[in-house]
Amino acid sequence: MAYNYSKLDEDNLKWFPNDNSCATLRTIKVLHGQIRGLRKATVDFCYPITAIAGCNGSCKTTVLALSACAFHNTSSGFKLSGRKQPYYTFSDFFVQTKEEVALGNIIVGYEILHDRWKGGKAGAAWQHRIKKSGGRWNNYDSRARRTVVFLGVERIVPHSERSVSKSYRGKFKSGTDHGWEDNVREIVGRILGTDYISFSYRRHSKYRLPVVAKKDQKIYSGFNMGAGEHSLFELFSIIYECPDGSLILIDEIELGLHEKAQENLIKELKEVCKKRKFQIICTTHSSRILECLPPESRIFLERSGVETVIIPGISPAYATGKLSGRRNVELDILVEDEAAKLILETVLDKELRSRTHVLPIGSAAAVMRHLAARYKETKHKKDKILEVCVFLDGDKSSKKIEQINLFIKALENPTEQQKSKEWVEERLLFLPGDEWPESWIVKPNDRNPFYERFERELQMSIAEVDDLLDSASRAGKHNEFREAAKILTLGETVVASHLIKSAFDSAPEESQRLIGFIREFLNR
């Protein structure tokens, strides 16, 4: 389903790539060497909130760690309780035992939007962190200054399971409020749908304990909070303690939260980003988190052998399918027959095939009637409906108006003619050529790609390929592939695949047209 951009999304998309005042992180590149599974990897950040999804072991947390190491800070800058320094170094995240291979010969590049580069320049520039084999990481103090906070999964551990908190439970005392406590109380209340009437911290040494009260309930502390509730109070307290323009890194942002709370959390974080120019990078396994963010916010990491593949702008449905290990179709493609299905499946790459389902329906009229039925579903069902588009044979392209009229007639609702016409025109495309698809395949304008492929794959001469194409073109409507397979004594699907690939190699603009049309739906 298409993502519905809010005014808040549009505002965040507008300021984020253009604001130099916050030392915004735009890109991370592993230029040389390997850090865990990341090698020659590029991660771009295109929205103030970035959600990184992926299966376990896909290097999601590694990206968070690299992000934390992009910046330095002043000695008086904000730091989490218990940390010695107000900044992070690679040794905070990348620790090896004696048995493990130490990191070495690594170069990591960071593209940062900044207004305080040396020489007074403002805009995007690159900084690099380098570690030679057996050496140290270079020049931490030369990094751009920015407050960075890394929140790992330990943040959700409730105080009732923290031995330190339990040992000090009688020593926590009231302190001076900072003035932001009511703001935090209201935000967490909106996220959880709870009416809190008070929120404050009790403190002892470097530790603190949240204490809240609800209407008609007594006061209760972090010892009696759920993990999600506690983590929200801590997250937004930290946000208010940090200066504007800070970078917040959150591992598994959805932990402890039900889906509606996840939705509300993202909405509140979008507001924070707009008002205070924060940048938030998080990891997630939640499809709801991805659904609440625009495509510019979503990144999927996937291991392929020893490499990590980075997929930006992934749809929530596609990500969910990958995380579950099951195919999760996002788009139904309606075609007339098996030949059209084979043509499309041959043209599409593995990713697009996994996200689509090509359905041969029958005649063009049957396809348009089926499409009309799908249109009715979108009007009467409240649940999400799988998106759909149509590819008719090329010989129907001259009768496009007739096909649309068949669709409108099948609706049996004249009051919706204009709206339904716009809907079907967005979803209707034609296969190449002005004849049936098989005829276009075996009658190319340029036979050179056929010569090259059939010589390489089947050891055929130019003369033999010419005879094959000529015989196939004389075989009669829809018999072209069968005749070619008969001549070569090979399976019809195998021969058809070679013919289709050769035809689109001779007319690459056609494959680009088909693929672009499909991607437009998947990226909505």
Image (cartoon, rainbow, N blue to C red):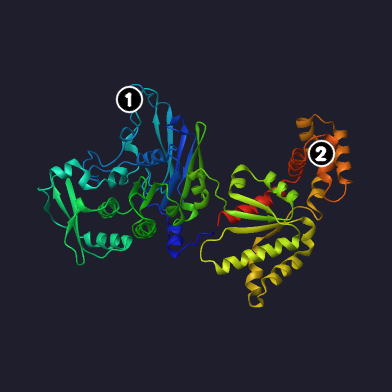
Q: Which residue is mark 1?
A: 97
- Above-or-below relation of 343 to 180: above
- Give how far across and how far down residue 193 sits, in percent: 31, 63
Q: Nearer the viewer, residue 85 or 237?
A: 237
- Give how far across and how far down residue 86 sits, in percent: 26, 42
At a point 48% along the width and 45% down the height, the residue shown is 324
The reply, left or right, for residue 146 in relation to residue 409 is left
Q: Nearer the viewer, residue 244 or 442?
A: 442
Q: Residue furthest bottom?
A: 415
- Between the C-alphas of marks 2 and 1, the distance is 61 Å
Element type at marker 1? loop
Residue 47 visible in rendering:
no
Q: Quadrant of residue 448?
A: top right
At a point 77% along the width and 44% down the height, the residue shown is 503
The reply, left or right, for residue 185 in relation to residue 408 is left
At a point 87% along the width and 34% down the height, the residue shown is 464
- Give how far across and how far down residue 158 sits, in percent: 24, 47
First of labels 2, 1 by sequence position = 1
User: Residue flagged by tag 2: what amino acid is it?
Assistant: Ala
Q: Quadrant of the C terminus?
A: bottom right
Q: Nearer the viewer, mark 2 or mark 1?
A: 2
- Give how far across and how far down residue 342 sits, in percent: 72, 46
Label 1 CA crowd tier, 10 Å (few <14, some 14–19, many 20+): few
At a point 31% along the width and 60% down the height, the residue shown is 192
Element type at marker 2? helix
Disc number placed over residue 485 in the picture, else none = 2
User: Residue flagged by tag 1: what amino acid is it?
Assistant: Thr
